[in-house]
Amino acid sequence: MTEVRVHVGDAVVARVAARSARGVPGVLALRADLAQTLLGLAGSVLRQDTGALPAEGVSAAVHGDTAEVSVTVVTRLGHNCRDLAQAVQRTVAADVAGYTGLEVLVSVTVADVSLD
Amino acid sequence: MSGANGHADDAVERLACGRDAAAAWDHAGAPDEHERTCPHCTATIADARRLDALVHRMADEPIEPPPSVLDRVLDAVLAELRPHHVLTLASPHGPAGLARPAAAAVLRHVVDRMDGMRARSCRIEQDDSDSADPAPADVTITVVARFGVDLASVTARVRQMVVAAGEQALGAPIRRVDIVVVDVFDGEEPA
């Protein structure tokens, strides 16, 4: 019997989590941190679009069988921030677990509330 | 003489017709009789013109940063500068937070929408001592009121509005609201 081991990388988890978080109703956008913003700008200036799923606003780290995911979102006035944060945690945890088989802890920060 | 010529022959790349490619290149703007008909020279001149067009097109392209570049960098810098300015939100699924400036902007916004009231500043404090369950927040908001509005009832309305907005919009319970009326305005609302 051959033993097959799959290790899922941080970037995979981050991209899946970003895609999942963007689909949660009430999430207007994900907010990248400074390093991601600058890297993103460099990429857009150099036109190095590799077609990869964007992961701005998400950082992820895989430790063994568990993943820690941190998501920063922007919402709009009218969505309860606490309920939204919980919805993002539930959705992202379920989607990442379903895709990677990892146990996932999701922390969410609502960085901004659009008042438009 | 012949030695010098031989040396020169080594240094320059001759086209099949015997002409110097560099010379043909230089004549690209005004080719002579031979260069207009010789296939090797016309090919060389075409190369020169193609490069010229390419270089000048790129040089003429204005270099513009993406339109929102300043906003994006500023947002990121501000977020980076105040990483811990976050209100803790109740969640059974893990850490959840709300940026304090965003929460304050929401509260100012709802007060601004009230008749005869304008919010100036808003500060939100949360006691972090009990980390297991997020503590209710204390809000200090400064407002200006329209002259003639009864201040006692207006502050009661502001308090009610802030507490309701905290529960409904933010999902953060608010324990105390301090309202400071710093000014009154007359008739037309101040900007």
Image (cartoon, coloured by chain):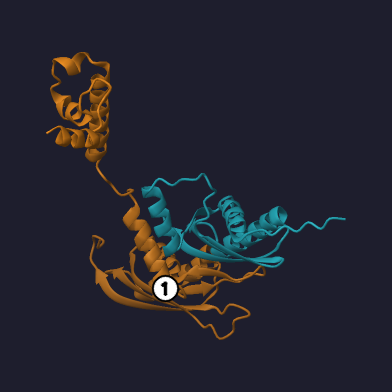
Chain A colour as displayed: cyan
Front residue of A4 and B119: A4
The relative height of residue A93 versus residue B4 in the rendered view (above or below) is: below
Snapshot quadrant of residue A94: bottom right
Q: Is residue A21 left or right of residue B33?
A: right
Q: Position of residue B43 (x, y in %)?
A: 27, 22
Q: Is residue A116 visible?
A: no
Q: Position of residue A54 (x, y in %)?
A: 52, 51
Q: Is residue A50 visible?
A: yes
* Amino acid tagged 1: Arg
Front residue of B149 and B177: B177
Residue that lies at the very extreme toward the bottom in this rendered image: B129
Question: Who's the residue at 17% across and 36% down the image?
Answer: B3
Q: Is residue B45 left or right of residue B1?
A: right
Q: Position of residue A89 (x, y in %)?
A: 63, 62
- The orange chain is B
Question: Who's the residue at 69% across and 67% down the image?
Answer: A66
Q: Position of residue B178 (x, y in %)?
A: 41, 79
- The chain containing the residue under callout 1 comes to B
Q: Look at mark 1 in the image and give the residue it sits on.
A: B82
Element assignment for label 1: loop
Question: Who's the residue at 23% across and 40% down the image?
Answer: B59
